[in-house]
């Protein structure tokens, strides 16, 4: 018998919560950070090392996977988990966000979005139904409704029109998911509404009426600034049901995540730890470091003595040498250490919430990141 | 008490031998293949994975390391082993070969070679004494004399003049090594002489007179063709002492190595498994594969079911996707699988020699590589 999808909050500390999402492929401890595995790989990491960092779930990008290698091909090869050697849960986005940011000649209609592949120019239709079909072909455990990620800035009218379309697509997505999904899979709705509190509320309530086992907050971290993002998050989580996980899409820095957790968010994804790792940046318990900096050329100390990550035990002088030389191993080690730092940050966060000392913990991390020798 | 450097032949099969080199940092089972760790990293591999392939020793390039990060810096940071997290033996070349192939404005005199760094144009002097000093600063377990790698083709006169210079440099290298080396370290001489048997003999006998604990055969695999290379190897090993390891530099393909082992060679290094791994090529027990080939797009079989390598268990369809997408993980997995294939080839070779069935084994491998769907 396959276990259903469920979520239970285990402890609260202010608006912050820690809990467990249960899926047929394993549990997801929240707050959770999902490393991004865009094209069926968390870039520059072996899948077993991703698991070793403590990640309970990764994210796959529907847009990239439907273009290459193709959803039907992945299904033929046993689904995304088997294909990429990752047996724990996978969340996939709907593809909508990347259609907006990567594809050429986009045209949005009531039916869906038509675009040209950035890879070969092929014309592709993505409807709410096709987005669900693709995610089901991939075998995704947590799927996302197709929505229009409202551009920023947007007038109130633009945001409203976009929101209304997304709401109709959300209903169609849910209907399609009901037809196609497997037991234990879940579909999340996505709250839009730009920076307009009344539209955010309308979006949240509309989605709750349709009814989803989890809700994402989308369309943030797109240039509106941290304060506005936090305001939108706080007012949205105040509306969303207590017993459903809340996922802030595409966020973020340690400081952004801590602020969002403080406002009731449970899940995150972001390319930051992996992309930074390929660009000489390290997230450590002593703050952010740029390993290209000459100050590390003869620094014999480990990258992060406070981390449990095997990669963080490598000396800064060696990492400096590797990144200066453009060696792949530099990107491999920094990516590994960064992904593990993000997981350790979530683990300590969960512990702090459980012990009712989250505010002090978050303040400590903010201080480390404020006083660190950051040198982007 | 530090164990000295020693070599013992354990079994013979024709001219092929299997044995053990004993060093203070561990044993080297021969025939041995040394993965190349040019700039203090075997490209795209974690050092623990290099060890996991069964490699007993790796090679470091003196030329690259003296330019970046610099030998004095490596020494200050505890030596090359600590720097790159590799505790088993390291062999370093003298730097001479790369001076010829990479540096600008080379000028060779009796004293040594002056060149401009390919990285920053700095003028650098490399003498036999400095080559040894650099290798001792790195802490190399097996060091090589500075020689002039005779260009190919070379007239007999050019080859003779080059050989004489290399011989004087070999004597100076040994004297310097006597001054600077640590207990248990070894210095190998290098036989030159281009494709002229009498010069090869003169070189081998001259070096034996100076006396080294091991001998390399240099200046081959530079365009002379496999038959000529094998002839030079055979006539040289017939002269070299039976009780010293013989190292064929810069070789090679599985077929080249098997032919050289058949002619009495004990050690190899080559960038082929690592470089090929970054260029979509896989060495497997079924032959060489090019993973970019569309025939693998939906091939659900593991890269190499006959290999024990974890990386070789990944499906060809997935590897095809990774290399087509330019994903780092593709290079990581293929490099790992290739380095392990080379080690498994050496392990099976040692076993076959020990059991007196090397000729049949080599023939079987040649057949696999002849009939494989190679598609460079």
Image (cartoon, coloured by chain):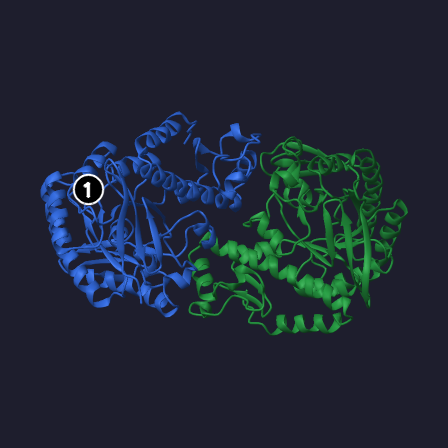
Chain colours: A blue, B green
Measured as percent of width and height from the top left, residue B113 is found at 73, 37
Instruction: Check the image and report above or below for B29 versus B140.
Output: below
Circle 1 marks a residue in which chain?
A
Q: Where is residue A94 in the image (x, y as percent from the top left)?
A: 25, 56
In-front residue for pair A139/B320: A139
**Which residue is under mark 1?**
A237
* Residue closest to the far top: A371
Is residue B120 found left or right of A369 in the rendered image? right
> Residue A159, located in which quarter of the rendered image?
top left
Quadrant location of the N terminus of chain B? top right
Q: In this view, does A342 lie to the left or right of A132?
A: right
Position of B282 with respect to B351 (left or right) is left
Residue B271 or residue B213, whichever sits in front = B213
From what the image shows, is residue B236 above or below residue B288? above
Residue at the image point whose x is 58% and y is 59% from the top: B338
Which image quadrant is residue A157 in? Answer: top left
Can residue A118 be seen in this snapshot? no
Residue neighbourhood size for the residue with mark 1, other residues' Cα within 10 Å, grouped as few (<14), some (14–19), many (≥20): many
Q: Is residue B303 above or below residue A102?
A: below
Q: Give the residue displayed 60% in from the left and 54% down from the top.
A: B52
């Amino acid at each position: 018998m396959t276990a259903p999808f469920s979520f239970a909050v285990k402890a609260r500390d202010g608006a912050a919560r820690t809990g467990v999402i249960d899926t047929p492929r394993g549990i997801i401890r929240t707050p959770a950070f999902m490393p991004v595995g865009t094209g069926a790989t968390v870039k520059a990491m072996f899948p077993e090392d991703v698991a070793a960092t403590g990640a309970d779930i990764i994210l796959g990008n529907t847009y990239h996977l439907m273009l290459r290698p193709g959803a039907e091909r992945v299904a033929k090869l046993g689904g995304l988990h088997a294909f990429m050697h990752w047996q724990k849960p996978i969340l996939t986005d709907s593809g909508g966000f990347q259609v907006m940011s990567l594809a050429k000649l986009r045209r949005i209609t009531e039916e869906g979005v038509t675009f040209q592949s950035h890879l070969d120019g092929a014309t592709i239709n993505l409807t709410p139904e096709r987005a669900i079909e693709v995610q089901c072909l991939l075998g995704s455990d947590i799927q996302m409704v197709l929505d229009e990620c409202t551009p920023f800035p947007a007038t109130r009218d633009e945001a409203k029109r976009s929101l209304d379309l997304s709401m109709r697509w959300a209903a169609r997505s849910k209907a399609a998911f009901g037809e196609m999904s497997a037991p234990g899979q879940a579909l999340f709705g996505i709250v839009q509404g730009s920076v307009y509190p009344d539209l955010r509320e309308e979006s949240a309530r509309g989605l709750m009426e349709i009814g989803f086992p989890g809700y994402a907050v989308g369309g943030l971290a797109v240039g509106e600034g941290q304060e506005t993002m936090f305001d939108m998050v706080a007012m949205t989580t105040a509306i969303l049901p207590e017993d459903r996980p809340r996922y802030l899409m595409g966020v973020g820095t340690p400081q952004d995540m801590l602020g969002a957790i403080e406002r009731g968010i449970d899940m995150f994804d972001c390319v930051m730890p992996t992309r930074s790792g390929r660009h000489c940046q390290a997230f450590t318990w002593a703050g952010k470091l740029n390993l290209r900096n000459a100050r590390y050329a003869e620094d014999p100390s480990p990258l992060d003595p406070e981390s449990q990550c095997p990669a963080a035990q490598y000396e800064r002088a060696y990492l400096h040498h590797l990144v200066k030389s453009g060696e792949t191993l530099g990107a491999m080690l920094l990516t590994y250490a960064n992904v593990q730092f993000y997981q350790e940050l979530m683990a300590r966060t969960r512990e702090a919430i459980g012990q009712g000392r989250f505010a002090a913990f978050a303040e400590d991390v903010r201080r480390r990141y404020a006083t660190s020798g950051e040198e982007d």
